[in-house]
Amino acid sequence: MEFPVRVVIYLKTDYQLKTRDTRELASATFFAPYDKTVEPYIRIATGDYEELVSERGKNDALWAILRSMAHEIIHYQQWLEDKEMDEKEAENGSEELLDSYYRFL
């Protein structure tokens, strides 16, 4: 996977984040500027981390954050390729990305 345009990932202490376009609440967002010279960014809500650790354990809590990050990275790839933001593709691609990461470990 290539990252020809820098994408900053912000880990926020919020439980949820508002999307820029629809103002809906989400656990993660990707800012996809129309102008490719403007830097995109990803925001991940981590405010529920301690609760997730209590409910699921540390590994699963971290995996939940990584899943959100991987999902948004797939949206970043869609943006690079001038594709529509496709949620199904992001879900499938994020699972493939996480599987690849897991095998790397």
Image (cartoon, grey):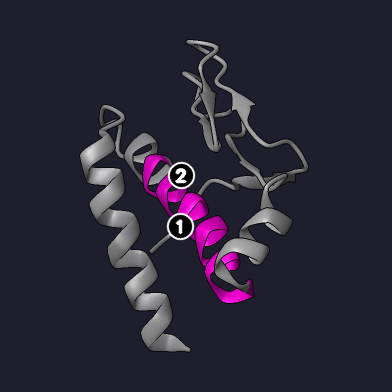
Element carrying mark 2: helix
Q: Earlier in the sequence, mark 1 or mark 2?
A: 1
Q: Is residue 9 magenta?
A: no
The vertical placement of 76 against 26, above or below, is below
The three-letter amino acid code for the residue at tag 2 is Glu
Q: Position of residue 29 (x, y in %)?
A: 53, 33
45 and 2: which one is in front?
A: 45
Task: Name the side, left or right, on which 83 lies relative to 19.
Answer: left
57 and 84: which one is in front?
A: 57
User: Which stretch did the figure color magenta?
Assistant: 58-75
Q: Are marks 1 and 2 in contact (CB under 8 Å)?
A: no
Q: Residue 85 occupies which quadrant of the picture?
A: top left
Which residue appears at 32% of the width and 39% of the height?
A: 78
The three-letter amino acid code for the residue at tag 1 is Arg
Residue identified by numbered label 1: 67
Q: Residue 28 occupies which quadrant of the picture?
A: top right
60 and 83: which one is in front?
A: 60
Q: CA distance from mark 1 to mark 2?
A: 9 Å
Q: Which residue in the rendered view is the most extreme toward the right? A: 13
Mark in the foreground, 1 or 2: 1
How dense is the environment of label 2, judged by Cα within 10 Å: few (below 14), some, or many (20 and up)? many
Q: Position of residue 88 (x, y in %)?
A: 21, 40
Magenta stretch secondary structure, dominant: helix
Element carrying mark 1: helix
Task: Name the side, left or right, on which 76 lies relative to 86.
Answer: right
Residue identified by numbered label 2: 72
- Label tally: 2
Which residue appears at 55% of the width and 20% of the height?
A: 19
Q: Position of residue 79 (x, y in %)?
A: 38, 35
Q: Quadrant of the N terminus?
A: bottom left
